[in-house]
């Protein structure tokens, strides 16, 4: 029984805008008008059974983008479909696949989804359409949860095999002889949620697809590739980098959409001098409660598992105090059992659940119906992800509301003070580098294990012989008299590759709390010194673990469950040495460049910070060896003559503050997490004999961010200057140039002056 009387979404929004707590936080309110559907008839070649199956679901025609994609795929053209959330992208590839099976039952298809949950969700949708059409199609999921007896039947009889890149890489391709029925008759390869394959992960997946197409060629099949994606700036280029093919790009949606209100909220300042703001957490809770109490289905996105659990607890407590339906608000994140997640998804689709608090796990295309409101606690890191999360709300033809609540961080503050960036800009370009040498060599080993290489055979843009010769020196391959390269090692190369990391090694995390130690996760080697050093508090699935011992040589961290009121944050000392300059160009009062660098980092101390407030409770030393990272960087070398009159101490402070502002803006302009880019400022570089600010990529070899920063130098300098100018703090804060205590009393003014000089506004 519902306590609160239902009211229109627009009425709830009006009350919120009249609420002083919300009204003073609004930095933007945009109304996106409703759009009508654009239809196209069903294709004439469609099997009558499929037409009947669609009719049973009330579909006697397609939206225009669906019709265009279906025709292109049926004609054998590789295709990428880029349309908003809930625009029926699944039908774009399901129809051609079902048509192929209807015409020839021996036809096969391979579906790739980035997560197991999404794959299982899509299997249900496929089976529903096949059943309604009277087609008996063997469609099955092949992932880590698939029982051994079922795996055998999937290999031999599966007409549509649904899996993820990790399983394709480690369990299918290395054992392709067991899958010959699939590879001999493979007609379609579906790559869903294309936009998730970026950075290191995208580089790995591109090489997995190279291996897949190589195996297909061996068995004589030439599948058509169907990609689908949320809106990004370079879908055709991304599909080309991932698949090595030039696809047809369909990016005009024919799906209808209701009116949408988009709000950007920035919690008001409490202490202008220090830049301290009211709680973004409490503001997001306040907004979400308004919709929940009015009976509107609402989704709240948190950026971490911990924030999801804290938000869920707060919302349930508030609903309980108002005698609301607490059991109708659930959490959703990694670490929940698959049965729990399926139950939550069903509850949202049916309307039994009123609200859900989720990580970005529900950002992807899992079917949860169409909600009335979405609340984002913090900027998700990209325009594409923001629109994907906001797009979870909005039933067709009905009004919906999406609210982004900015945190006090620098990136969020840039978005809050530049709301037009999110509301008006085109989505970012997703970047990846499939030819990153670390990644390429790893997959070349895996490919050689799967099939011998012919002399002159390409793996990527160039013939692989030179790299294979290098692997031969390492003892991994050998060249036979016929010129072919054969696998020569006893190792299983795929097991040594993690698709989520560029490093060859990870540190395994072992929980010793119970009677038997168990592995609960792993972290990248370069992140381990700051995350799992001895006495660190490691957070996993919203649980706290104390790191008792880090065995660095064995790459193992031993942890145990604890319940404490703090977490730890490590500091590192970083030095950087440029190795090679790939490009350089003159810029105002400086030279911009990008190239190859060696970064040395040493974890020094850790701080204990209270969970609720971030209050510093103490510190300790970290005793670990220095790590070296061979990567790429973009840098700005200041003109010595222009800055000759600056005091050395002032310039040191200004470089750090300006570097942090540039780092924040860079992570906004590129589709990257702020942690993907590190920053080093040198007041007198030993390599260039001048002041330099470096932004370096945080993965071995880089993934192509540095050249993009080089190209967008002027835009980035202008954005950093604007960020610092608009920040209302007096002398620097975490939202612009860094905390006041770190940068000094006049750090903000000095950083602003330096950036203004780089922007050409006045001489130093």
Image (cartoon, rainbow, N blue to C red):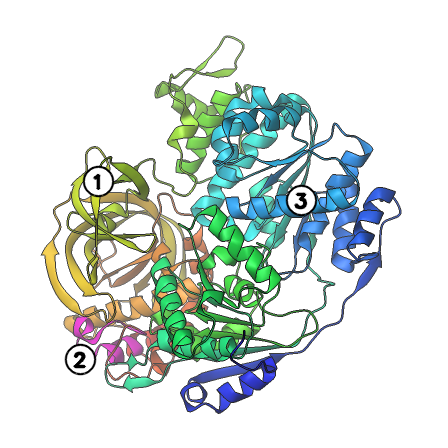
Provide residue 205's location: percent of width, then percent of height: 51, 40
Q: Residue at x 67, y 73 (%)?
A: 258
Q: Residue at x 50, y 31 (%)?
A: 147
Provide residue 91's location: percent of width, then percent of height: 71, 50
Q: For residue 274, what is the image quadrant?
A: bottom left
Which mark, by number, is residue 512? 1
Marks 1 and 2 close (CB-CB < 8 Å): no
Dot 3 alpha-carbon crowd within 10 angstroms: few under 14, some 14 to 19, many 20 or more:
many
| Residue lying at the far right of the rendered structure | 44
Q: Which residue is mark 3?
A: 226
Residue 482 visible in the snapshot: yes
Mark pair 1, 3: CA separation:
45 Å
Residue 330 vs residue 52, the one in the foreground: 330
Tell me if 154 is positioned left or right of 443 in this view.
right
Element on which disc 2 rests: loop
Element on which disc 3 rests: strand
Q: Which residues are magenta?
A: 735-752
Provide residue 658's location: percent of width, then percent of height: 30, 70
Residue 503 vs residue 663, the one in the foreground: 503
User: Which circle's residue, 1 or 3, is located before the other in the chain?
Assistant: 3
User: Which circle's residue, 2 or 3, is located before the other in the chain?
Assistant: 3
Instruction: Quadrant for the C terminus, please.
Output: bottom left
Tell me if 660 is positioned left or right of 437 in this view.
left
């Amino acid at each position: 029984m519902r306590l609160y009387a239902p009211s229109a979404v627009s009425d709830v929004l009006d009350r919120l805008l009249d609420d002083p707590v919300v009204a003073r936080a609004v930095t933007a309110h945009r109304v996106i008008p409703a759009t009508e559907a654009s239809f196209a008839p069903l294709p004439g070649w469609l099997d009558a059974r499929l037409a009947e199956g669609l009719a049973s679901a009330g579909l006697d025609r397609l939206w225009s983008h669906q019709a265009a994609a279906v025709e292109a795929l049926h004609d054998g053209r590789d295709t990428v479909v880029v349309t908003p959330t809930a625009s029926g992208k699944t039908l774009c590839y399901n129809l051609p696949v079902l048509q192929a099976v209807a015409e020839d039952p021996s036809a096969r298809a391979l579906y790739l989804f980035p997560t197991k949950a999404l794959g299982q969700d899509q299997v249900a949708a496929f089976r529903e359409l096949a059943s309604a059409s009277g087609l008996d199609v063997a469609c099955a999921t092949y992932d880590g949860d698939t029982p051994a007896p079922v795996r055998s039947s999937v290999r031999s009889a599966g007409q549509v095999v649904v899996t993820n890149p990790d399983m394709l890489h480690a369990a299918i391709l290395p054992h392709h002889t067991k899958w010959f029925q699939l590879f001999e008759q493979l007609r379609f390869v579906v790559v869903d949620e294309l936009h998730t394959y970026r950075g290191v992960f995208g580089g790995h997946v591109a090489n997995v697809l190279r291996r897949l197409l190589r195996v297909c060629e061996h068995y004589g099949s030439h599948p058509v590739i169907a990609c689908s994606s949320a809106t990004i700036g370079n879908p055709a280029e991304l599909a080309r980098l991932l698949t090595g093919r030039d696809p047809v790009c369909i990016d005009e949606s024919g799906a209808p959409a209701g009116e949408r209100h988009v709000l950007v909220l920035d919690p008001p300042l409490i202490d202008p001098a220090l830049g301290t703001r009211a709680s973004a957490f409490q503001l997001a809770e306040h907004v979400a409660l308004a919709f929940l109490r009015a009976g509107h289905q609402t989704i709240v996105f948190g950026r971490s598992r911990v924030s999801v659990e804290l938000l869920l607890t707060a919302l349930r407590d508030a609903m309980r105090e108002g005698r609301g339906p607490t059991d109708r608000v659930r959490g959703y994140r990694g670490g929940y059992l698959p049965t729990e997640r399926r139950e939550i998804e069903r509850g949202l689709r049916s309307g039994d659940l009123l609200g859900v608090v989720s990580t970005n796990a529900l950002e992807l295309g899992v079917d949860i119906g169409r909600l009335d409101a979405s609340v984002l606690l913090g900027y998700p890191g990209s325009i594409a992800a923001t629109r994907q999360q906001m797009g979870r709300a909005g039933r067709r033809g009905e009004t919906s509301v999406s609210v982004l609540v900015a945190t006090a961080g620098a990136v969020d503050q840039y978005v809050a003070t530049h709301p037009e960036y999110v509301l008006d800009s085109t989505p970012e370009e997703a970047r990846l580098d499939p030819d990153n040498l670390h990644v390429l060599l790893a997959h070349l080993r895996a490919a050689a294990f799967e099939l011998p290489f012919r002399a002159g055979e390409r793996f990527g843009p160039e013939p692989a012989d030179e790299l294979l010769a290098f692997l031969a020196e390492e003892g991994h391959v050998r060249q036979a008299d016929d010129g072919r390269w054969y696998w020569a090692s006893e190792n299983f190369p795929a097991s040594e590759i993690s698709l989520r990391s560029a490093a060859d090694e990870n540190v395994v995390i072992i929980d010793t709390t119970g009677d038997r130690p168990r592995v609960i996760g792993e972290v990248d080697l370069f992140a381990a010194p700051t995350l799992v050093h001895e006495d660190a508090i490691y957070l996993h699935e919203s649980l706290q673990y104390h790191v008792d011992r880090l065995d660095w040589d064995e790459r193992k961290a031993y942890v145990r469950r604890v319940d404490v009121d703090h977490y730890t944050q490590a500091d590192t000392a970083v030095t950087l040495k440029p190795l090679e300059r790939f490009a350089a160009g003159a810029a105002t009062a400086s030279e911009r460049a990008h190239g190859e660098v060696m970064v040395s980092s040493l974890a020094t101390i850790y701080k204990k910070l209270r969970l609720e407030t971030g209050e510093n409770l103490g510190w300790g030393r970290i005793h670990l060896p220095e790590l070296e990272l061979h990567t790429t960087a973009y840098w700005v070398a200041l003109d010595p003559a222009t800055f000759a009159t600056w005091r050395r101490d002032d310039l040191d402070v200004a470089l750090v503050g300006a570097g942090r502002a540039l780092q924040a803006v860079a992570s906004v302009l590129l589709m990257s997490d702020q942690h993907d880019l590190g920053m080093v400022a040198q007041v007198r570089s030993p390599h260039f004999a001048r002041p330099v600010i470096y932004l370096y990529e945080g993965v071995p070899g880089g993934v192509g961010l540095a050249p993009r920063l080089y190209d967008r130098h002027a835009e980035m300098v202008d954005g950093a200057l604007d960020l610092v100018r608009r920040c209302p703090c007096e002398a620097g804060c975490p939202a612009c140039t860094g905390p006041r205590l770190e940068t000094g009393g006049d750090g903000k003014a000095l950083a602003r002056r330096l950036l203004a000089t780089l922007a050409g506004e006045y001489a130093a």
